Image: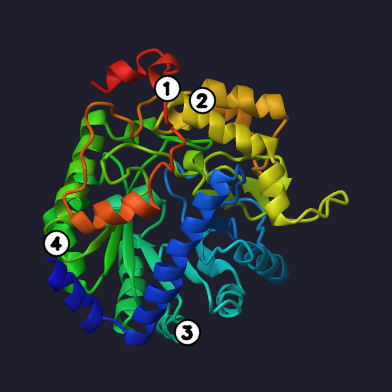
């Protein structure tokens, strides 16, 4: 399997792009995590990976979307984006996830990325705007990987995404990327309507045959004004998803990304461990994309001239969010203890940074659900390379050490995991 994966990487992609990945995202990315670990030992903090929503607009209307895609368009201006990236680079950062909305609707997207050839960018996209011309430009840049979302069959895709002919347009964008030898990924937000179609060997084999180098199975989270909780995976389906990822990593020549488990199979939250936070289109700094509250901004508001480093280091809201999450669960505090999160937001008078201005009410109305934390049911990685990589560069960094999460679990949550 390892030989087959290496062969695919060498013969199915542009060698220059492969080098950019190995250098910018590989070596420099590992160094950024090492700096993060050193900062934690000194009692300092700055996330090594940042996810940046550069626009709120989108051409689709996905079920359960928490982004204000239908409101007045807001974009991060190039000057603000460059300042953000430069300040993050000064802290050793090189990786940025570009999200939205639909990032390719930003009129200056590729020009902005072109200004930072020493970084690596992953664009989360539905693929509808990736023409052959844009794919050629991405290949020219060399340091960008498109991660294209596929949400099911033709019928399910249209239902999930609120428009017609969604899958065919997505596949057209995907094919344009592959035709131009881009390092291309495909992601899926797993829910009850698509898990049987896409969490399968047949689908993964098709991705490999097409030339897709990596895939990412997210888990649908019921957030926003219309959360659609009936689409959520059951605890049994969530365990099935984890088992599938672990087994597939050990037998198929395709990289499978996950963000919620360490190499021993223990659950974690990237925001709780501090490895990443999120910037929204208005420039507000959020703990993660689904926690749409903030006390800090990348912009200089009301005479605030602090650097990005100072804002992350001095933010009491972000600090206490991480601490509360660490004390409460190894999973997702938003799903398991929305009551505690609501109390934290109110304590710090954190601003609702949505356009709809109903995020606090939505949080208060949430039903307690299980998340990735399943004590006693951990599934360690079978692929030794994933296990080693996670041991050094993607783990809990000791933040959960000595925590007894049973004391803070909401009634029924731990019982629901059994």
Number of residues whose C-alpha sits closer than 10 Å to that of mark 4, classed few (under 14), some (14–19) or many (20 or more): some
Q: Are marks 3 and 4 in contact (CB under 8 Å)?
A: no
Identify the residue position indicated by label 2 in the image: 338
Of badges 4 and 2, the one in the foreground is: 4
Considering only order in the chain, which callout, 4 or 3, is on the residue closer to the N terminus?
A: 3
Q: Residues within 10 Å of mark 3 (few under 14, many from 20)?
A: some
Q: Look at the image and tell me in which quarter the N terminus lies.
A: bottom left
Pointers 1 and 2 in contact (C-beta within 8 Å): yes
The residue drawn where x is 29% and y is 35% is: 233
Depth check, front residue: 319 or 412: 319
Does label 1 or label 2 sit earlier along the sequence? 2
Label 1, residues with CA under 10 Å away: few <14, some 14-19, many ≥20: some
Query: Which residue appears farthest toward the right when viewing the image?
Result: 303
Give residue 368's mark: 1
- What is the CA distance from the residue labelled 1 to the residue labelled 2? 7 Å
Can see residue 250? yes
Using a 10 Å C-alpha cutoff, classify the residue at mark 2 as few (fewer than 14 neighbours), some (14 to 19) or many (20 or more): many
Kindly report the distance in space between the C-alpha atoms of the residues bearing marks 4 and 2. 38 Å
């Amino acid at each position: 399997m390892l030989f087959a994966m290496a062969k695919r990487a060498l013969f199915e992609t542009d060698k220059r792009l492969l080098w950019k990945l190995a250098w910018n995202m590989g070596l420099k990315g590992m160094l950024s995590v090492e700096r993060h670990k050193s900062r934690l030992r000194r009692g300092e903090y700055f996330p090594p990976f940042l996810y940046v929503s550069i626009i709120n607009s989108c051409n689709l209307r996905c079920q359960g979307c928490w982004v204000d895609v239908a409101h007045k368009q807001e974009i991060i201006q190039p000057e603000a984006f460059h300042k953000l990236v430069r300040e993050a680079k000064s802290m050793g950062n090189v990786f940025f996830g570009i999200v939205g909305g639909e990032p390719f609707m930003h009129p200056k997207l590729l020009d902005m990325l072109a200004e930072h050839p020493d970084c690596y960018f992953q664009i989360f996209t539905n693929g509808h705007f990736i023409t052959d011309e844009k794919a050629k430009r991405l290949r020219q840049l060399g340091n960008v990987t498109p991660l294209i979302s596929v949400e099911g069959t033709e019928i399910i895709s249209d239902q999930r995404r609120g428009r017609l002919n969604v899958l065919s347009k997505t596949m057209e964008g995907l094919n344009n990327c592959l035709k131009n030898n881009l390092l291309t990924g495909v992601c899926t937000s797993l829910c009850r309507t698509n898990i049987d179609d896409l969490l399968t060997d047949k689908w993964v084999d098709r991705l490999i045959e097409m030339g897709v180098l990596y895939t990412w199975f997210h888990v649908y989270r019921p957030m926003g004004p219309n959360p659609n909780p009936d689409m959520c995976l059951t605890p049994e389906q969530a365990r099935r998803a984890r088992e599938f990822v672990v087994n597939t990593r050990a037998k198929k020549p395709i990289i499978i990304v996950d963000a919620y488990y360490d190499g021993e199979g223990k659950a974690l939250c990237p925001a709780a461990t501090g490895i990443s936070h999120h910037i929204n289109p208005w420039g507000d700094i959020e703990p993660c994309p689904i926690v749409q509250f903030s006390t800090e901004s990348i912009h200089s508001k009301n005479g605030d001239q602090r650097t990005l480093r100072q804002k992350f280091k001095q933010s009491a809201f972000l600090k206490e969010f991480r601490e509360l999450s660490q004390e409460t669960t190894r999973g997702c505090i938003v799903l398991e203890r929305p009551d505690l999160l609501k109390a934290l937001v109110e304590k710090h008078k954190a601003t609702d940074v949505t356009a709809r201005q109903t995020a606090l009410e939505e949080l208060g109305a949430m039903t307690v659900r299980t998340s990735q934390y399943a004590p006693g049911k951990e599934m360690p990685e079978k692929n030794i390379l994933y296990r080693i990589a996670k041991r050094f560069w993607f783990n809990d960094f000791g933040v959960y050490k000595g925590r007894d999460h049973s004391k803070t679990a909401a009634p029924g949550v731990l019982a629901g995991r059994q």
